[in-house]
Amino acid sequence: MTQPPVAPQRPHIRRIHRTETADPWHWLRDRDDPAVREYLEAENAYTDAVTAHLAELRQAIFGEIKSRTKETHQSLPTPKDDWEYRARTVEGLQYVIHVRRPRGGADDAETVLLDENELAEGHDYFAVGDLAASPDHRLLAYTVDTDGDEKYTLTVVDIASGRVLDGPGVPAPRCGLTELSYGLVWANDNSTLFAVRTDEAQRPNRVIRHVVGTDPDDDVEVYREDDERYWVGVGASRSERYIGIGCESKTTSEHRLLDADDPTSALVLVQERREGIEYGVDHQGDRLLVVTNDGAKDFRLLEAPLPNDSEAEPPPWRELIGDRPGIRLDGVDCFADFIVVHERKDGLVTMRVHDTSTASEELPLGPGVEIEMPEPVYEAGGGSNAEYETTQYRFGYTSMVTPPSIFELDRGSGEQELLDQLPVLGDVDLTAYRTERIKATAPDGTAVPVSVVWKPSAVSWPAPCLLYGYGAYEIPMPASFSAARLSLLDRGVLFAITHVRGGGELGRPWYEGGKLANKSNTFDDFAACAAHLVATDWADPARIVARGGSAGGLLMGAMVNRHPELFCGIVAEVPFVDVLNTMLDPDIPLTVTEYDEWGDPNDPDAFDTIRSYAPYENVEAVDHPALLVTAGLNDPRVQYWEPTKWVAKLRATTTSTKPILLRTEMGAGHGGPSGRYDAWRDEAFILAFICDVLDVA
């Protein structure tokens, strides 16, 4: 058999970080070192050799994914003023083409705004960060990343002529902005942009004001945040009255507003930050609407006065929706005459429409009506609603057996209309699949939801199973549709999503129950879900593969160490497995902002907690399951050296003969390949590995 590469050991040249003397892999951090690239490419070659027997299966799965996809497809038009904006894909092309047409016009009246395929030529990786038309629809601003490192470059074009007004192709001094983060907003003067810059640790830490076509040296820094726990973002209200600058840590928020009609006006503070208090703000009519956890574990909705320059004492904020334990208030969508309240109860999204045009002192939100959902297990959220003055509300809907769909609710009649649904081509009969939500019991007695989907005609019980998990940052794992997943279901595989603690499925207590000192609950929940599926004859105990990425990759690392007997295979994608060393190094991008999620290991108690579960520190000589581990050379979120050194340590200690494979994308970042065909091939590679380990290949 082809042997895995052996990493050369490098002497330490200098001591920069406290972890350097304890970590013999510190030399890996120099991505420009030819030896580093040689080592990663040798790992890729080893993985290719070990999985060579799956080439035909990979091609078959890729063909299945491709055959189910309508390759030439247009999105639903999004109306805004006199125009309709949409995106389309074309068979054979990797990337999206952005177009627009006059409102109500025919397709032949379309104008191409941005063809990503043209811009991507010559690049292994390509991603658009932000795309925004000016308020008068004359200019288009967009940002692009061509490395996967999430550092974006701005370009502004005149839509009618196609002339580049600002960007890397324009001679100095109009040479454009580089190394931007996410967030790009136009002021109403149609010439001023607000964008976000980062510090040396790639933390979004300041907002700058840039006038199109001017020297970037003349840009004005509107806001800077020096506290390294916080990051900065910029956005605009749907009403187009305010530009908002938000400053947030994992536990605390602070927001400022700026008059969108006067981009040089002063920022107005909405509410000063207080440790542990989070809030979000939006504008409707003569008030601000604020969603906050101030006085409410699962958040409440308050009404606040608009910013003003008078010396008069502003009226106190008024509560509109109070604290309701077990019902997480996620946010509101604001329109001229109504709002949509987004909540999550029992792990499911609810959306309630309130007619604020008939609001009164007794009923300040107006009457509310909950939007009905057609299935018991689903995921839903606000759609593309660009206009403030409207009576229509679009929302997205999907389930594990229903492709992504867009519905439109008429506020007047209350009727819903299905406007669009992602087509699934071929001989696929979606009624042949079943989905259900069950509950496992964690060691401490907590009930953990599990969403499952299977194809009754293909499965034999107990079934081979793919178990997916994440469990961090209060992010709910959606029970959503995947066309690629059908390749597993058609081969008789049961697919299950674990909604473990640390996620956001069951409110703020659910999140807090899986972070910081409680992080082990995430791992216990996931293992309990696997055990429950076995005990109830859903899953074959000898054929369960676990899969997770990023923070979910940390979960996978914990399973390798703590419960290798539960799984025949594990897929860990860009896994955060070197938690302790990373959190001890404030120079690594985004480390300090993560202290509120994982803990600051400079505190002895936090150090001991992280040390107790960090996958790299807890590798032991056990019979490991088969492992496929992925990385991205340019990943700024989970550095490539984390999975690389973890794999090497696993190989050096394991008592198993099962493969431990590392696959690094040499020209991509956290999300893997950027082109859709490349992404399908990447997914086919992973699914073929899973099928092989589950013995359904």
Image (cartoon, rainbow, N blue to C red):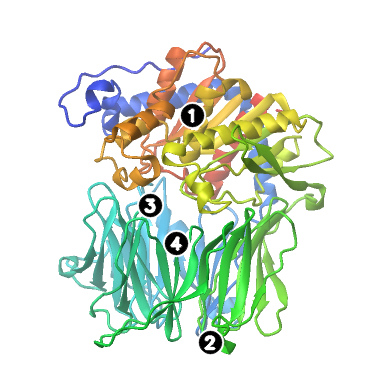
In the rendered image, residue 300, in percent from the top left (x then y), is placed at: 50, 67
Labels 4, 3: front one: 4
Q: Amino acid at mark 4?
A: Asn
- The mark that comes first in sequence, 4 or 3, is 3
- Numbered mark located on residue 293 in the image: 4
In the rendered image, residue 304, in percent from the top left (x then y), is placed at: 40, 78
Q: Is residue 465 above or below residue 308?
A: above
Answer whether labels 4 and 1 touch (C-beta < 8 Å). no
- The mark that comes first in sequence, 2 or 3, is 3
Near-viewer residue (34 or 224) = 224
- Numbered mark located on residue 250 in the image: 3
Q: Is residue 485 visible?
A: yes
Answer whether labels 4 and 3 touch (C-beta < 8 Å). no
- Label 2 and label 4: CA atoms lie apart by 24 Å
Q: Residue at x 19, y 22 (%)?
A: 12
Labels 2, 3: front one: 2
- The mark that comes first in sequence, 2 or 4, is 4
Answer whether labels 2 and 1 touch (C-beta < 8 Å). no
Q: Residues within 10 Å of mark 1 (few under 14, many from 20)?
A: many
In the rendered image, residue 503, in percent from the top left (x then y), is placed at: 52, 47
Residue underneath mark 2: 361
Q: Is residue 263 left or right of residue 455?
A: left
Query: Which element type, helix, strand or loop, lies under badge 2?
Result: loop
Q: Amino acid at mark 2?
A: Glu
Q: Residues within 10 Å of mark 3 (few under 14, many from 20)?
A: some
Near-viewer residue (3 or 546) = 546
Q: Amino acid at mark 1?
A: Gly
